[in-house]
Image (tube, rainbow, N blue to C red):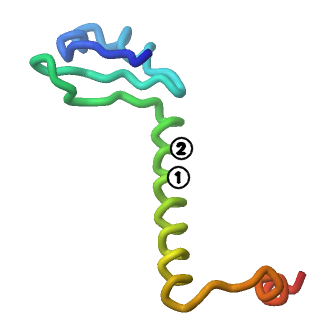
Amino acid sequence: MPNIKPISDLRNYTEVLKEAQDGAPVFLTKNGRGEYVILSMKEYDKMKAMLTLLSKLEEGEQSARKEGWMSAAEVEALLGI
């Protein structure tokens, strides 16, 4: 279940930060609407790495569509396996 708190709870920010654990971000609302998310640094780094990976995979797929796909044998030969 998501951890949702009003932004006014930041008056006692140490308690809010304690709740922002790995895999459990804290969502802050302002006037009843979602406004901010507090993540642990570990979760933030993990999310950044995932976005970078997805971006690289998209680049590879675009390249393959434009230049053609390689067979497994071609990849093995290229890598010297």
Please state which of residues 67 and 59 is positioned toward the viewer in this rendering: 67
Q: Is residue 11 left or right of residue 17?
A: left
For badge 1, the amino acid type reads: Ala
Residue plotted at (46% across, 40% down): 44
Q: Residue 50 location, x and y as percent?
A: 52, 51
Q: Is residue 69 left or right of residue 80?
A: left
Secondary structure category for the residue under label 2: helix
**Badge 2, how many Cα within 10 Å: few under 14, some, many 20+?**
few
Q: Residue 43 location, x and y as percent?
A: 50, 36
Residue lying at the far bottom of the rendered structure: 67
Task: In the rendered structure, find residue 65 and report the number of the disc placed on it.
Answer: none
Q: Quadrant of the N terminus?
A: top left
Q: Residue 28 location, x and y as percent?
A: 26, 21
Q: Quadrant of the C terminus?
A: bottom right
Q: Which residue is mark 2?
A: 46
Q: Which residue is mark 1?
A: 49
For badge 2, the amino acid type reads: Lys
Please state which of residues 3 and 20 is positioned toward the viewer in this rendering: 3
Please state which of residues 14 and 77 is positioned toward the viewer in this rendering: 77
Within the image, what quadrant is residue 22 found in? top right
Residue plotted at (50% across, 21% down): 21
Secondary structure category for the residue under label 1: helix
Whole-number angstrom distance, CA of label 2 to CA of label 1: 5 Å
**Badge 1, how many Cα within 10 Å: few under 14, some, many 20+?**
few
Q: Is residue 65 above or below residue 31?
A: below
Please state which of residues 14 and 31 is positioned toward the viewer in this rendering: 31
Residue plotted at (53% across, 75% down): 61
